[in-house]
Image (spheres, rainbow, N blue to C red):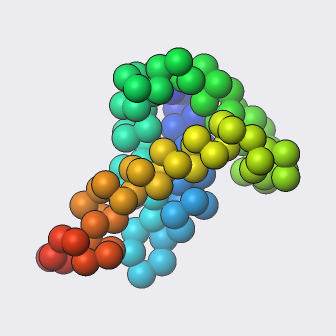
Amino acid sequence: MLTETQRATLAAFADVIVPPDDAPGGAEAGAVAFVEDLLARELAPHAAEYAAFLDTLAASGLDFSPEQTASPIFKLAAETVHEAYWTSDIGQRAVGFLATH
């Protein structure tokens, strides 16, 4: 559903929203696949707007303007990345809900 450029932008955005540090970031937690699944189902009505948002981010080099960060689509994108992270095994291990290996 998303283009390769949009997927790469989403992965970079995911790592801005949930940066890798002692634990993996949003991209490694599977945010791209999680969001693509949401866009194919529950968020299908927002899929075109989400894709356009990713195109805008790619064109800006992930340089967020105050208007962008205040927009509903930015908030939706950040929320979906957070949901992806905290429902993943990586996110749950980061807060101790799952044992680390």
Question: How many numbered marks have been drawn onto this rendered protein structure?
Answer: 0
> Splitting the image into 4 quarters, where does residue 16 fall?
bottom right
| Image quarter (top left, top right, bottom left or bottom right) of the C terminus | bottom left
Q: Hey, which residue is sitting farthest bottom in the picture?
A: 22
- Is residue 88 toward the left or the right of residue 22 in the image? left
Front one among 20 and 48: 48
Kindly identify the residue that appears in the image at 48 percent across and 77 percent down. 21
The answer to whether residue 88 is above or below residue 25 is above
> Splitting the image into 4 quarters, where does residue 85 fall?
bottom left
Kindly identify the residue that appears in the image at 18 percent across and 71 percent down. 98
- Is residue 27 toward the left or the right of residue 100 in the image? right
> Splitting the image into 4 quarters, where does residue 56 fall?
top right
- Is residue 24 toward the left or the right of residue 11 in the image? left
Is residue 91 in view from this perspective?
Answer: yes
Kindly identify the residue that appears in the image at 37 percent across and 41 percent down. 34
Residue 66: horizontal and vertical position, in percent?
Answer: 85, 52
Residue 42: horizontal and vertical position, in percent?
Answer: 40, 26
